[in-house]
Amino acid sequence: VTEMDKGGEFADFRSSFLAEAEEHLQVIEHSVLELDSDLQSGEPDPRRLRELFRAAHTIKALAAMLEFEPVVELSHRMESILRALERHSLPFTQMVVDGLVDGARSLASMLDDIRAERNLQFPTTLLQRLDALANLAASPSPQQAEDSLSGYEQSQVDAALASGKSVYEARFTPTAESVQRGISINSVREELERQGQVVRIRPEMSPSGGGVSFVLLVATDMPASTLAARTGLEEAQFRAVERERAAEQPAMIVETSAPRSSVVRVEIGRLDELMRLVGELVISRARIARATSELELGARRDTIYSIQEGSQQMERQLRTLRDAIMRVRIVQVREAFGRMPLAVRDSARAAGKQVRLEMSGEETEVDKMLVDRLIDPLTHLVRNAVDHGIEAPAQRRAAGKPEEGTLRLSAQQSGDWIVIQVSDDGRGIDRDRVAAKAVALGFSGEEILESDEALLRALCHPGLSTREEAGRTSGRGVGMDVVRQRVREMNGTLDLSTKQGAGSTFTLRLPLTLIIVEALIARSGGQRFAIPISTVEEVAELPRDGIVAFNGSRIVQHRGEVLPLLHLNQAFHLREDRPDRPYHHALIVMVGGVRWAVTLDQMLGEQEVVVKALSDVLARTPGVIGATDLGDGELALILDISELVRHYREPGHSAAAPEENSSARRG
Amino acid sequence: VLDAARLGGEEPRSKSSQWIVFSLDQTEYLLRSSQIVQIEMVEKITPVPNSPAFVKGIAYLRGEVVPVIDLRVRLGMAPAEGGLASRIIVTETGGRRVGLLVDRARDVLYAGEEEVLPTPETATGGTSQVEGIIIRDGRLLLVIALDAILEADASLLPVDAVNSLAQELAARTTERDQDRQS
């Protein structure tokens, strides 16, 4: 029925279409907002118009090749409006800019649909609106008015096509000759009514100039030849309206959140580098293969050297190859930030607020996968800040602030991490209100009043992201709990600092790459664990007799400081391997501003590990962010020390460690 | 789902579905082969601390981390001892991949969906992890309700009821075997 089959070749085209179209869409989204600010000066920047025109035009051309008709139609109209603006034949007004902004938004959602392999719908209302705008231009293009059907007309065309009928567009220009033959618009219409159903009759200035033409749209079972014969028109005057003109049949609404383009553009130089490295690996392998075959003739010292050397060489090469591949995956965080101005504009408009968005560090480089996963939580935080953080202009004035609120979005690299902050100068989070609600969910109200960390934990509780909390735009099914979950899936952390009356700052710390981390490997309770090295300040040996039980918990002295202490084995109900040793191995970690000691049985060493997510609910447990294969087929759990401490430090958790439970589980 | 199972079988012309037969103690169970990705020897399973008791742990199977359920514990029996015959049946449903640790998994059975008889109410108390029974050559085979088994909340399942059903069936099977031998 539709061109959007799932054939392999088409899928290839689709992904490269998406990759390219998305780049141009970013240009459009960005420039269209700039146009919005140009409104104040009353003049659009001509360079910007040309940039926009080029982007819209390219999208149109790409979409036409793959027959994404709704995209073609929409970008075509945006193009016409831009051209009219450039020629000053269309007044530069808010209405026009709004039309373009909505066009950009609709393009974005169509690209989403294409990505998710959903059928495309014609944005009929928007198309008509854009047509109306284009008609304001001094020289209206007849072509465009022709294309727009009303929703009802469109539905009739769709229904007819769907039921196997044909739809024809007939153009009838009364001439002296036709009058002589007794053919008038009335006779044509009556005859067509008999043969089928006339959907629309539209008079139009004849293209040749002078008289009036009529364009009739008819749905019928008859072939064009019959219609021509009956009406006395030429067969050539009937043009079949193809399915392309009709909206696709309504797709099932399946909410798959398709990841954004999974395509990365790679400089050819980087690929060459990869090829070169693979070539080196092949040589190393050949060297080892030769040496092993020599071994069959008897082990000689230099043969063994040769193998050892080859193995070392391969190790180095693999490392370089891995780094090179990681570089291929690197993109700028701009890909995520670039989506935010539109989100801010939408929310600010809907809420009647004035918001200035300041962005910095867009050029920070991160893993492509991370950027893709960042968009949703970031959008939510940004919308939240506009909806709930920044006050209405009047309120701000009353509070002695400028009417326009400021939303800052920043990214910066810090070691192996990227730190992203969303910060507003709004009213801050109302602790009292959150505390009042959260108490019912078992939180300590006092803690919420005192600590930002406790406040954030409460905010991230699914029970608190109620509909009442969620504003019109931020309430799109993504609550703070989901934000936290997403950040967690990226092995990142989320922090909050907020001050009543002065605003809030959310800080996301994410590992630059999701895939490979340098980790400490430890053994505890007969099981191996990996701990990302970047989360650990120090590895220490703590004498057992230095540990003091205090107020239901344990503390230990280390480097002149008193640290709270957590036994991993107790938290995880594991049996200690080395109870005979006079000391513990411990990780010194910083959690929420407090330095902790986490003991485990034995440190084994350091290793780079490939992180595998533990996504299934059955495998999830607090304090564990993933698993990794240490090279022998047995998985080791990767610990999130900070979550481990947060979860198990609560009195009650650490105390209750029933031995029989642990033995049953280990059996 | 049913249609897919039928089409997915090796004999598209017949109306049969393909089922995998596995056993726990003396009782035989069935899973639709359309729900099964692979059957693996038991290698190394890493325990996940503080997970439900029936979660044996996670295993690395063909490049993927898969949680493994000890089906014996899930159904209220003593934990698996892990003999040579035990297998991990890797299932896939609702986008999830979960392994089921079973004592043996050897046979394939062809049977139409219409052969699935309802479980006697009395035995299972209404809801259960057994969705029906197939009787073939005098053998009773219990069709596992996979979705219920994969539910993370153990309290949903009346373990005792299924347990007694399983024991009852085991007893009958033993009797039958004895009859045959005599």
Image: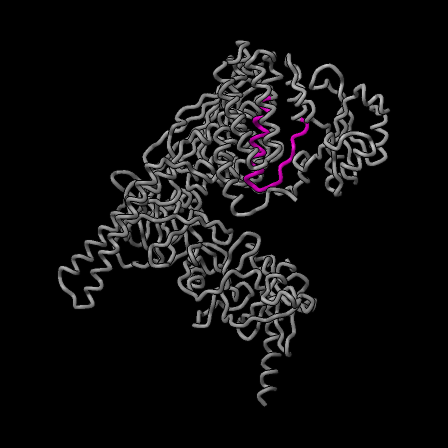
Q: Who is closer to the viewer here, A21 or A497?
A: A21
Task: Give x and y (percent) for residue B146.
Answer: 58, 60
> What residue do we see at 85% from left, 21% from top?
A180
- Inspect this view and state whether residue A398 appears: no
Q: Who is closer to the viewer here, A22 or B75?
A: A22
Q: Who is closer to the viewer here, A516 or B56?
A: A516
- Inspect this view and state whether residue A630 appears: yes
Magenta: main secondary structure equals: helix
Image quarter of the N terminus of chain A = top right
In this picture, residue A233 sits left or right of residue A535:
right
In this picture, residue A161 sits left or right of residue A595:
right
> What residue do we see at 57% from left, 73% from top?
B27
In this picture, residue A78 sits left or right of residue A167:
left
Task: Give x and y (percent) for residue A516.
Answer: 35, 45
> What residue do we see at 54% from left, 57% from top?
B92
> What residue do we see at 44% from left, 48% from top?
A613
Task: Give x and y (percent) for residue A267.
Answer: 36, 35
Span shown in magenta: A100-125
